[in-house]
Amino acid sequence: MKTTLDLPDELVREMKLRAVMQGRTLRDLAAEFIRAGLGMAAPSAPQTPPPDSMVSIWPTGLPFVRCSADAPTARMGVEALLGLEQASQTSEDMQRAGFPV
C-alpha cells in the first residue's frame, strides 16, 4: 500500500545513507524499521554492501566510498575537501530555507 509521510529531513537522510550502505531500497529499510518499532519482528543484522559496490563499511561502522585514482578529489587536500563539504551543506540549507541557490 502506498502512503505519504512527512518526516524530518535528517531522519530521511540517515535512512537513505543506511539504505545505500546496506545495498537495500529505502522502501525495504523503512518497512523493517516500522516493523521493528511495532514489535512485529526482531531487527535483522545490517547487510554488507555487494562486493562490486563502491561503498564499504569500516570496522567503526562508518561508510567509506571508493573512487577511481584519477577522481578530482584524489588530488584535493583536506582544506579543499572540507570547503567543498561546507559549500554543499550551505547550498542545501539555503534551498530548505527557500532562498535561491
Image (cartoon, helix red, strand yellow):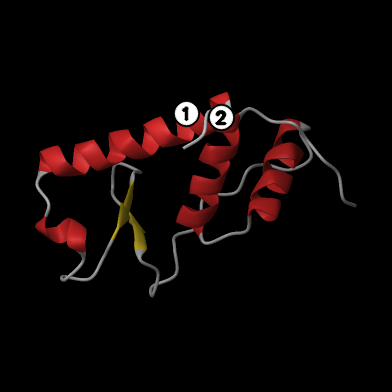
Circle 2 residues within 10 Å: few <14, some 14–19, many ≥20:
few
Residue type, mark 1 in image: Asp
Which residue is rendered at x = 34% and y = 59% of the image?
56
Q: Residue 68: x percent and y percent?
A: 22, 71
Q: Residue 59: x percent and y percent?
A: 28, 47
Residue 38 relative to residue 19: left or right: right
Which residue is rendered at x = 15% and y = 42% of the image?
80
Residue 92 relative to residue 3: left or right: left
Which residue is rendered at x = 52% and y = 38% of the image?
14
Which residue is rendered at x = 19% and y = 62% of the image?
72
Tally the numbered discs. Answer: 2
Residue 6 relative to residue 84: left or right: right
Q: Secondary structure at mark 2?
A: helix
Badge number at residue 93: 1
Extreme front residue here? 100
Using the image as rendered, state which of residue 66 and residue 43 is in the foreground: 66
Extreme right residue here? 1
Residues at badges 1 and 2 in contact (C-beta under 8 Å)?
yes
Q: Secondary structure at mark 1?
A: helix
Residue 81 relative to residue 45: left or right: left
Residue type, mark 2 in image: Arg
Query: Residue 78 occupies which quadrant of the picture?
Result: top left
Using the image as rendered, state which of residue 16 and residue 30 is in the foreground: 16
Residue 70 position (above or below residue 5):
below
Badge number at residue 96: 2
State how far apart marks 1 and 2 are (Cα): 5 Å
Using the image as rendered, state which of residue 90 and residue 14 is in the foreground: 90
Q: Residue 34: x percent and y percent?
A: 74, 38
Residue 45 position (above or below residue 47):
above
Q: Residue 8: x percent and y percent?
A: 63, 27
Circle 1 residues within 10 Å: few <14, some 14–19, many ≥20:
few
